[in-house]
Image (tube, rainbow, N blue to C red):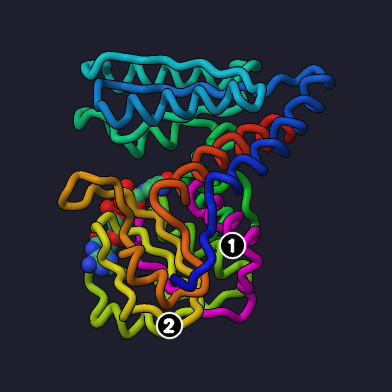
Amino acid sequence: MSATIIDGKSIAAATQLEIKSRVTALTKRGIHPGLAVILVGDNPASHVYVSNKVKACGTVGMHSVLEQYPADLTESALLARIESLNHDADIHGILVQLPLPPHINEHAVLEAISPDKDVDGFHLINAGALMTGQPRLRACTPYGVMKMLEYNQTPIRGAHAVIVGASNIVGKPMAMMLLQAGATVTLCNSKTRDLAHHTRQADIVIAAVGRAKMITGDMIQAGATVIDVGINRDDNGKLCGDVDFDSVAQVAGAISPVPGGVGPMTITMLLMNTLEAAEKL
Ligand code: NDP
């Protein structure tokens, strides 16, 4: 293996130390950053995600509340709860864990969150702000990837970045952040013809599809930086990314692992967004 490992766990730990000291400073000024996490239903993966988020708040000295509701909660009851949190002075960030039960309109819920408390960065105002080069609260996963590239000192200006996966929560905001940082961006999706033709030209590859080990070493240019956003299970049930780590690490200059890569950064940037929302008061 020749690639440098981009260790998301240690970058997350360093970033959380910085957040903690800013939380302490803000608390001294009488503002104690607080996050409200709403979980509807009993999706087991969502339970793990929300409890990790709440735990992380404690690590940096933030206040958090976890509100759990049954799967048959009505959309209007959820919207009413969000509206009340929008006006709660102790809460600076509101996160509604996705996916929601099918009878609830996800878009309506995300748009109901005040853009100033939208710490997931999914509200149209925040997505539009990023799109027009005036970022406010940014989507946590791509924001975390930008931090990883910064720590790795990966040159972005003038680099060719190829993003595989174009979702609203990862691929698209990732493209906007890299574009704003001066990269030339190619954004691929499931209809892209000859994906390897694109990835082989990349100085930076971001994989965000959700297909185990689909990016292989022969698809990567020597020395490229490869960030793996995917979370999958391989044939043996072991956690793995979208990148075939063993073959890609032979050719890449730097690579992020799964687990221990983007995952810890996503939670950390949620804390950063909550802090930034509180600091703006
Ligand atoms: P989505 O399913 O919403 O989007 C997947 C994207 O990949 C779509 O744009 C789709 O294209 C594209 N795609 C599908 N197949 C291919 C293909 N063969 N070649 C190129 N593109 C393809 O997923 P998410 O963005 O929500 O998540 C992606 C992965 O990242 C998942 O594994 C998820 O678990 C993980 N994730 C990890 C996070 C973390 O913190 N580490 C946070 C968020 C997600 P099309 O638009 O044409 O359908």
Q: What residue type is labelled 2?
A: Gln
Q: Over which residues does the magenta segment extend? A: 140-167
Residue 50 location in percent, x, y?
41, 26
Q: Can residue 41 be seen in this view?
A: yes
Q: Can residue 161 be seen in this view?
A: no
Which residue shows up at 42% across the image and 15% down it?
67
Q: Is mark 2 on a helix, strand or loop?
A: loop
Which residue shows up at 21% across the image and 16% down it?
72
User: Count of labels shown?
Assistant: 2
Looking at the figure, which quarter contains the C terminus? top right
Dot 2 surroundings within 10 Å: few (below 14), some, or many (20 or more)? many
Q: Earlier in the sequence, mark 1 or mark 2?
A: 1
Which residue shows up at 53% across the image and 49% down it?
8
Q: Is residue 157 above or below residue 86?
A: below
Drawn side of residue 259 relative to residue 148, left or right: left
Q: What residue type is labelled 1?
A: Leu
Residue 174 location in percent, x, y?
48, 60
| Ligand 1: image quarter | bottom left
Which residue shows up at 64% across the image and 76% down it?
157
Marking on residue 221: 2
169 drawn magenta: no
Label 1, label 2: how far apart the Cα atoms are: 17 Å
